Image: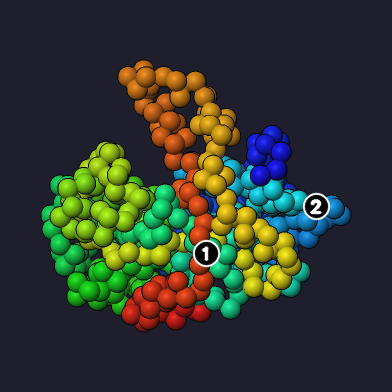
Amino acid sequence: MSDNRWSADRRTFVKTAGAAGVVGLAGCSGGGDGSDGSDGSDGSDGSDGSDGATAGDSGNSVPEVTWVLNPAEEEIDIQVQYQPLFEYLESEVEVDIVEQPTASYSGTAQELRRAAEGDRLFADVSPGAVAQIPSELDVTGMRVAYGAEQYFSLITTTTDSDIESLSDLEGEVFASAAPTSVSGTLFPLYMLSNAELDIGSAPSGSPEDFDLRTSDHTTAREQLIQDDRIAAAGTGAFSTAAHVPQEQFDEMSQDFVDISAEYEGAGGSDPELQLLAVSDPIPRAPVVSNAAWEESLKDDLRQLMIDAPQEAFEHDSQADIAEALNIDPAILDMDESELSEDQQDDLDLVEAHSLWFSGVVEASVEDYDPVAELGRELGLEWSQL
């Protein structure tokens, strides 16, 4: 490691990405919450990012690399979450990382489609993007969470629900994440299909046997908890596992018990949810780059990510996170009994902004073949999503 401290020069979270990047971040809370997908906020009209995702040097001797940030959970300021990794890369290589948040998964894929020769672009994407646009990207590596290279999709309902099995969801309203989210929509649809429910033309169209509401992982969970009209929700385990007691996973999925990074914290959050289904293991989401970028800098940054120590993915302290979120760091030293409800919410938000992955391992397009196969099982035309 170089002599530079990773946080010696605190990053400005909204740097030079421009107004479009800020708009993209704001769109995370409202984009794609209808049942017709993310049309209008997915970048198809050029409104979901910079014009062409060009990462030039702007007269600066330090090369710029754009990092397109894929939204996952509504409450997360993803630029704050990724701060330690970007600081680490900038401390090891002469490079300026320009963050570019997008409002949807499809918006991230659109930025990769736009990237041309001369653009320098990394992106954190859903596993589905590898199946969707394999010729436009190179897989940099697979993000792993504390040794786990696979994660899971869950279908849950409330404890007072009459829903006891997936087949009971016929005629009901089902909440899920973005239409192209592998863990939040595609695997839930696959599990529902295996339960002999007719998923119709979902996710691009409507199911026959139930109503589908797509949004994001957090919104799907909160709709299930707060809206009696929602019978069940499909999300990544990172969103709902904390609400499901461990013994339910013990009874339903040994793979989840053995593999999932979320098992240890299962059941730790209120309100309790009832587990209906657990997916097969899913390869964790990759970091990718635009395929047209062929400079040695790209290989240098890739190798840095793969070789990085765990500390490169950790904030210096929770106080740094709190300050970045404009939250009073004093709450970190308070006893739980002293916290007001709002302060507890702030504390939970600080903890949620720790970077969810602890390393990057070598991976290739072939590692995501199970996701491509999932699409074929669902009858999807990946290129048209």
Towards the viewer: 44 or 115: 115
Q: Quadrant of residue 237?
A: bottom left
Horizontal and vertical percent position of residue 23? 62, 51
Horizontal and vertical percent position of residue 101? 59, 54
Q: Is residue 352 above or below residue 262?
A: above
Towards the viewer: 144 or 75: 144
Residue that carries the numbered disc 2 in the rendered image: 62
Horizontal and vertical percent position of residue 351? 44, 36
Secondary structure beneath dot 1 equals loop
Horizontal and vertical percent position of residue 59? 86, 54
Q: Is residue 96 left or right of residue 84?
A: right
Q: Amino acid at mark 2?
A: Val
Secondary structure beneath dot 2 equals loop
Towards the viewer: 91 or 176: 91
Near mark 2 (Cα within 10 A), the count class, few <14, some 14-19 or many ≥20, is few
Q: Quadrant of residue 370?
A: bottom left
Q: Which residue shows up at 37% across the image and 19% down it?
A: 335
Q: Quadrant of residue 214?
A: bottom left
- Mark yes or no: residue 39 visible: no
Q: Which residue shows up at 67% across the image and 64% down it?
A: 299
| Rendered image: mark on residue 362 | 1
